[in-house]
């Protein structure tokens, strides 16, 4: 059985991130399903985002990609010696919209600059 979804549908989920994610946080710890309160309590660096920081791309009938550009901020706390760092996007009110792994897992010291890389989230055609 053939499966297909219009790009507008694929973009719908990506637009939920683009239009509502106004904070990007570096987390010192994360467990799948953590609440907004837990995520914000584990934040060691927070930067502000605007919808213009996100770009949607991809040809029709193909996966659609949401990309957020690089950002930097100042760490407000230490990560500890062996962090399991993650990056979270929130609406700064009560929703965690997207969490991804931060693969370097470097120790972070309060007051130091944190450089967030460009990140992508892909919305695929149904399989």
Image (cartoon, helix red, strand yellow):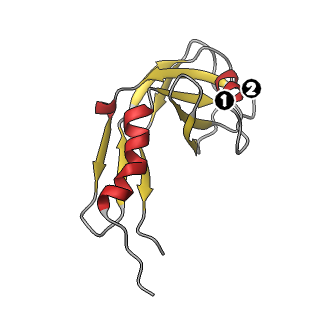
Q: Secondary structure at mark 1?
A: helix
Look at the image and tell me whether residue 118 can be seen.
Answer: no
The numbered dot on residue 39 is: 1
Left/right of residue 14 with respect to residue 114 in the rendered view: left
- Classify 10 Å Cα crowding around label 1: few (below 14), some (14-19), many (20 and above): many
Which residue is under mark 2?
Answer: 80
Residue 110 in picture, x, y percent from top left: 62, 14
Q: How many marks?
A: 2
For the residue carrying disc 2, how many other residues have a C-alpha within 10 Å: few (<14), some (14-19), or many (20+)? few
Position of residue 60 in the picture relative to residue 44 (left or right): left
Quarter occupied by residue 95: top right
The quarter of the picture where the N terminus appears is: bottom left
Residue 60: x percent and y percent? 24, 65
Q: Residue furthest left?
A: 59
Residue 117 drawn at (x, y percent): 44, 38
Tell me which numbered mark, 1 or 2, is placed earlier along the sequence.
Answer: 1
Q: Is residue 17 visible?
A: yes
Along the line of sight, which residue is nearer the eye, 124 or 16? 16
Residue mark closest to the camera, 1 vs 2: 1
Residue 9 to residue 99: above or below? below
């Amino acid at each position: 059985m053939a499966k297909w979804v219009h790009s507008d549908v694929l973009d719908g989920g990506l637009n939920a991130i683009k239009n509502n994610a106004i904070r990007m946080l570096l987390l010192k710890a994360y467990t799948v399903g953590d609440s907004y309160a837990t995520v914000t309590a584990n934040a060691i660096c927070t930067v502000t985002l605007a919808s213009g920081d996100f770009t949607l791309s991809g040809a029709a009938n193909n996966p659609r990609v949401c990309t957020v550009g690089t950002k930097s901020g100042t760490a407000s706390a230490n990560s500890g010696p062996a962090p399991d760092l993650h990056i979270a996007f929130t609406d700064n009110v009560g929703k965690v919209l997207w969490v991804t792994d931060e693969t370097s897992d470097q120790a972070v010291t309060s007051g130091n600059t944190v450089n967030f890389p460009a990140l992508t989230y892909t919305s695929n055609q149904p399989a």
